[in-house]
Image (cartoon, coloured by chain):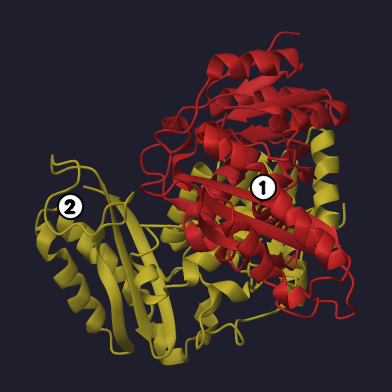
Chain colours: A yellow, B red
Amino acid sequence: MPLEIIRTSSIIRETSKKYHAEGKRIGFIPTMGALHEGHMSLVQRARQENNVVVVSIFVNPKQFATGEDFDNYPKDYGKDTTMLLKAGVDVLFMPNASDIYPNGFCTTVNVMGITDRLCGKFRPTHFSGVTTVVTKLLNIVNPTRAYFGQKDYQQCAVISRLVCDLNMDVQIVPCPTIREKDGLAMSSRNIYLNPEERADAPSIYKSMKHVEEALKNSKLPLRQASRKLNELLLSISTVTEVQYASVYDPESLVEITDVLPHGNGRGPVLIAVAVKMGATRLIDNLLIQL
Amino acid sequence: MPLEIIRTSSIIRETSKKYHAEGKRIGFIPTMGALHEGHMSLVQRARQENNVVVVSIFVNPKQFATGEDFDNYPKDYGKDTTMLLKAGVDVLFMPNASDIYPNGFCTTVNVMGITDRLCGKFRPTHFSGVTTVVTKLLNIVNPTRAYFGQKDYQQCAVISRLVCDLNMDVQIVPCPTIREKDGLAMSSRNIYLNPEERADAPSIYKSMKHVEEALKNSKLPLRQASRKLNELLLSISTVTEVQYASVYDPESLVEITDVLPHGNGRGPVLIAVAVKMGATRLIDNLLIQL
């Protein structure tokens, strides 16, 4: 079947209703385009688990603050469409901003607490934009399941909370981070890196892996993990700023400075970092077992 | 069929799915109980327009501020249940607060702008509580149509905006205010009035009607409507405070101080008031054509 491209929310809503009436399960992957293998891994997973796969491409103005890269966000709709067609996606939803935010639009959805931490500290309006648009997209497409990459770990956590808190009838499926062969987490923003930065970028992952190993082998006390991670990241020559780099409770995203939340010295923890390489902001994380 | 009483959101969700799978249309009336003929008019309308009628009773803590009447809000579940049974309601959803707001709940839905005006000025956290719980109830029950009384005109406007902005797949049906024979708008809070206040209360409606007539007969210039209305309301002996009383744009709820928004001297306007009679806060409104 060919890829159906739909540009208005009223039409995709009818399309979705038709599929539901036929008893079909819809897997949905909301994206901002500039697709890479990370996105395609979500598509493959959705393809396996559902009868119909819907992908949206919408560069959501409300999740970018003034001075962020909204205007320059990478776009390649030709390449995106080809990738989706090859992957057997059924429907591509590509709305205009005026369809999503018509005149008079004045509603926001906010998840509190976990949105204040990690990326939320540095992008204070970001998650409100994400939760508002994701609520809208989920309501428009009405999927059975929606797929999100764990590279954006905090986003996954926020959306899971949102869907639970607002009793939305959709299953959120977090999927593993896909990495380049050298370890760099795939991201649409990697295209911003100059050759020197790109060569340095895998060291972000290596730094996290180093701290993981040291923690697991008890060579590094938990309370020194953040200092060690910062030290490693700042030693990368193209890193101009470390926004955050530490060990966090995977649920609350509160920094763990000493004792694990469950108190017995064991359990999952999240190593998460955000750095700037030149002007490019990169994030990555590792969910590890201690 | 008997009235089915459901107390948990997971069960009513499954019940709703079953009805939808049978192709049935669900009419939904969210209430805080203490039902009166106003609520029952919504039930009757829903009964006419749908296959299944669901009523919820949930006194929503989040829409009451500290010092408001949450603890004393009238409750008479026996009487409510009897009324719903007689009216042929199919399902009564009566969740506990811990089902609606479980531990860790941290999401809010906010409609901006129109919530700052009228009641929003005097109850600044009220509408956020309303929009959050209505979003949840609509997601849980997933009705075809939801019915709201225009006695709470601003609430109707806010919920219509919410449903449109978040692309919720439900039709909001605003229904006319039901009044006692003497003109007092029905409200669960009328029970708070002492005999003297109750005797005075119809004068609120009479004051609005007086201003309506005077505006229609061009005996009162629009810019003097608010002064006249305040004068009339303050002349009611048990009225202790007029919180707002004026003429408003029925869409934006911005006060009209002189020229009608459409500029040609004609069009619908809203007369709306909130007063305190002793300790009891009463609101009422009239949508009129000029």
Mark nearest the camera among 1 and 2 is: 1
* Element type at mark 2: helix
Counting labels gives 2
On the image, the x and y values in percent for residue A285 come to 36, 62
On the image, the x and y values in percent for residue A24 come to 77, 36
On the image, the x and y values in percent for residue A277 come to 38, 86
Badge 1 vs badge 2, beta-carbon distance below 8 Å: no
| Left or right of residue A150, residue A7 in this image | right
Q: What label does residue B203 carry, if any?
A: 1
| Amino acid type for the residue under numbered disc 2 | Lys
* Element type at mark 1: helix
Residue drawn at (46%, 65%), measured in percent from left and top? A179
Q: Is residue B56 visible?
A: yes
| Amino acid type for the residue under numbered disc 1 | Ser
Residue drawn at (75%, 42%), measured in percent from left and top? B177
Which sits in the foreground, B193 or A255? Answer: B193
Residue drawn at (41%, 59%), measured in percent from left and top? A154
Q: Is residue B136 above or below residue B254?
A: above
Q: Is residue A131 visible?
A: no
Q: Which residue is mark 2?
A: A216
Farthest residue, direction top: B2
Which sits in the foreground, B131 or B255? Answer: B255
Which sits in the foreground, B240 or A229? Answer: B240
Q: What label does residue A87 carry, if any?
A: none
Chain at numbered mark 1: B
On the image, the x and y values in percent for residue A270 come to 30, 56
